Amino acid sequence: MKLLTVIVQGDDAPFLLESLTKRGFRATRINTAGGFLKKPNATILLGLDDEEVDDVLAVIRTNCQTRLEWANLLPGGPGLDDFLLAQPIEVEVGGATVFVLDVEQFVRL
Ligand code: 2BA
């Protein structure tokens, strides 16, 4: 058995969850935020049989888009000069970041 930890953009999460649950997969959504952009995103946990992993990855690919976002890199100081020196950079935010973990034991009580 595997545990998929899937980080997706907030806008994609409702469509992804609907597609997954329609296909009979069980999922848990946690509202999270990216450490770099600090924008809301969603972390979705799925417990799966090994042979289901590829099907779920295909559903994720269909529902999650790559987007370009602007991030302001601040020099680090607190002053107005530091604010004015902020460098906007463009970053590509992935369709999804997926960690696939082996599950030692799964129990439903
Ligand atoms: P954020 O941390 O907000 O990162 C958003 C995007 O900013 C990243 O997209 C990447 O393109 C860029 N980025 C992140 N850290 C950077 C850095 N130190 N320097 C330059 N650019 C940077 P993705 O890689 O697609 O990541 C999307 C979100 O997935 C991340 O949001 C974070 O919440 C999560 N994530 C990605 N990799 C992770 C990892 N190794 N561990 C935990 N969470 C991860």
Image (cartoon, rainbow, N blue to C red):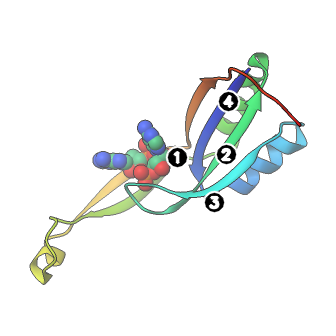
Q: Where is residue 29 shown, x and y percent of the image?
A: 70, 51
Q: Where is residue 104 shown, x and y percent of the image?
A: 68, 20
User: Disc 3 or disc 1, which is closer to the eye?
Assistant: 3
Mark before the other along the chain sequence, 4 or 3 = 4
For ligand 1, tell me if the residue under mark 1 lies within 8 Å: yes
Mark before the other along the chain sequence, 3 or 1 = 3
Q: Which residue is mark 2?
A: 44
Q: Amino acid at mark 3?
A: Asp
Q: Amino acid at mark 1?
A: Thr
Crowd class of label 4 (few under 14; some 14 to 19; many from 20; radius 10 Å): some
Q: Where is residue 78 shown, x and y percent of the image?
A: 16, 77
Q: Which residue is mark 1?
A: 66
Does residue 92 appear in the picture of this structure?
no
Q: Quadrant of residue 106?
A: top right
Q: Amino acid at mark 2?
A: Ile
Q: Residue farthest to the front?
A: 109
Mark before the other along the chain sequence, 1 or 4 = 4
Residue 84 placement, left or right of 40 = left
Mark before the other along the chain sequence, 1 or 2 = 2
Asked if the residues shown at circle 1 and circle 2 are in contact, with their CB atoms under 8 angstroms apart, the answer is no
Q: Amino acid at mark 4?
A: Leu
User: Disc 4 or disc 2, which is closer to the eye?
Assistant: 4
Mark before the other along the chain sequence, 2 or 3 = 3
Q: Residue farthest to the top?
A: 51
Residue 39 placement, left or right of 10 = left
Q: Which residue is mark 4?
A: 3
Q: Give me the residue at 85% from left, 44% from top.
A: 21
Mark before the other along the chain sequence, 4 or 2 = 4
Q: Secondary structure at mark 4?
A: strand
Tell me, for residue 11, which label it has, or none.
Answer: 3
Q: Establish if 68 lies above or below 52.
A: below
